[in-house]
Each structure stands twice: as structure tokens, then as C-alpha cells.
């Protein structure tokens, strides 16, 4: 996104928070279809010990497929720019793991000892799959910004890559991708004429 200054913190439909901007002109009275670009990574993804290139590709494809299916069920999808067409671009800006922080009760010496012993037995402190996306919607003819958002989320627990088929897998993030794409389709109905 070229400019983050318009974004304001707001609650997200599928839970959690996001930074977003909505142009007051973005209404069903003005828009009746979406031109959806393929979901991309930005910057280009780099595989790590925690996530393979194969998993990165699967995650991107699943996000693209889920958005197309769920948006397409609610609003008209088109292949070309034109009057009344909103141009939607979605980029995955981060995929990785985040170490779970200790809860307050886990700082009590006995709980800390138990948490520590469990963590060692499981290969370290629990870690969760994480993903961040940026969405931008513009008028497909004028290029005027209609909507922009930045959002991050946490998926399921990640098994250490050293423990076999571990690291971030599509299955770790699939429920979150499903929630987000459903929320995006429901939100689209507020801004774009329904099918």
C-alpha cells in the first residue's frame, strides 16, 4: 500500500482488530461488481526453517480460492475494469510463527516449572502460525481509493519443523483463511450491490 496514513484502528468482523479506511463513496449505489486480482505475496516470499516454499504456495492459492468462492457467492465478479466496478487487490505480507507468550499465572514458580517442563518435552515454548494481509480496493476506472486494510491473525499451533512434518502448514492457517474470506464476502455486501 502506498499510503497508510488514512488507516484507523477498527474491530474486524471475524474478531480481532485491523487498521482500515473506507471511502464514503464506496456504496452499493455506486458499485455493482468486483474485479479481483490474484492474491500475491509482497514482498516475494522466502522459505525458512519454519515454512517451506510449498506451504507458502499452498497458503496463497487457498487464500485466492477462498476469496473468489465466497465473494463470488455474494457479489458479481468480472474480468474487466468499467463503471461501477471495484478493483480489489490482496497481498499476503507475512507468514510465519510467533512464540506464545506466558500467561500471568504461568509466572507463578510452580506453573512456570510445569510450563517449562512441558515446553521442553514439546520442543520449546508453544508457537502459533501467523499471517498478515493488506487489502486495497480502488475504483477500476478512476483509481480512487475506496477501501484499504491491514490485518494480522494467529492460526493453530505449529509443531517444530525438526519434529518431522512441522513448521507452518496450510492446515495451520486454513480455518483463519476461511473466517477472513467469509468476513470479506459479508463486508462486500455493504459496499457492492448483491448478485
Image (cartoon, rainbow, N blue to C red):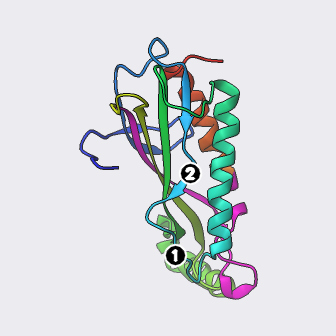
* Residue beneath the point at 34% across and 26% down: 23
SS for callout 1 = loop
Disc number for residue 138: none
Using the rendered image of the protein, determine whether residue 136 is visible from the camera's viewpoint. Answer: yes
* Residue beneath the point at 34% across and 21% down: 24
Q: Quadrant of the C terminus?
A: top right
From what the image shows, is residue 84 above or below residue 103?
Answer: above
Q: Seen from this angle, which residue lies furthest top?
A: 29
Q: Does residue 70 show up magenta in the picture?
A: no
Q: Does residue 162 show up magenta in the picture?
A: yes
Callout 1: few (<14), some (14-19), or many (20+) C-alpha neighbours within 10 Å? few
Q: Nearer the viewer, residue 82 or 9?
A: 82
Q: Nearer the viewer, residue 121 or 90?
A: 90
From what the image shows, is residue 85 above or below residue 53?
Answer: above
Q: Nearer the viewer, residue 108 or 156?
A: 156
Determine which residue is flagged by label 1: 46
In this picture, which residue range is highlighted in magenta? Answer: 145-174
Determine which residue is flagged by label 2: 39
Q: How many marks?
A: 2
Indicate the quadrant where residue 49 lies.
bottom right
The percent position of residue 155, horizontal first and vertical second, equals 61, 58
Q: Nearer the viewer, residue 16 or 118?
A: 16
The percent position of residue 40, horizontal first and vertical second, equals 53, 56
Q: Seen from this angle, which residue lies furthest right?
A: 164
Indicate the quadrant where residue 74 lies.
top right
Amino acid at each position: 500500500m502506498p499510503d497508510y496514513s488514512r488507516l484507523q484502528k477498527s474491530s474486524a468482523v471475524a474478531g480481532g482488530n485491523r487498521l482500515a479506511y473506507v471511502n464514503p463513496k464506496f456504496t452499493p449505489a455506486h458499485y455493482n461488481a468486483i474485479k479481483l486480482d490474484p492474491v500475491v505475496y509482497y514482498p516475494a516470499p522466502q522459505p525458512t526453517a519454519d515454512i517451506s516454499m510449498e506451504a507458502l504456495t499452498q497458503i496463497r492459492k487457498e487464500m485466492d480460492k477462498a476469496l473468489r468462492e465466497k465473494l463470488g457467492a455474494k457479489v458479481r465478479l468480472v474480468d474487466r475494469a468499467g463503471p461501477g466496478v471495484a478493483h480489489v487487490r490482496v497481498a499476503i505480507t507475512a507468514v510465519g510463527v510467533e512464540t506464545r507468550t506466558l500467561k500471568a499465572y504461568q509466572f507463578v514458580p510452580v506453573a512456570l516449572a510445569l510450563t517449562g517442563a512441558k515446553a521442553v518435552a514439546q520442543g520449546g515454548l508453544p508457537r502459533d502460525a501467523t499471517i498478515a494481509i493488506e487489502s486495497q480496493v480502488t475504483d477500476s476506472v478512476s483509481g480512487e481509493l475506496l477501501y484499504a486494510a491491514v490485518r494480522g491473525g494467529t492460526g493453530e499451533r505449529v509443531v517444530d519443523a525438526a519434529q518431522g512434518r512441522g513448521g507452518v502448514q496450510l492446515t495451520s492457517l486454513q480455518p483463519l483463511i476461511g473466517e477472513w474470506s467469509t468476513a470479506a464476502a459479508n463486508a462486500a455486501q455493504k459496499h457492492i450491490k448483491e448478485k
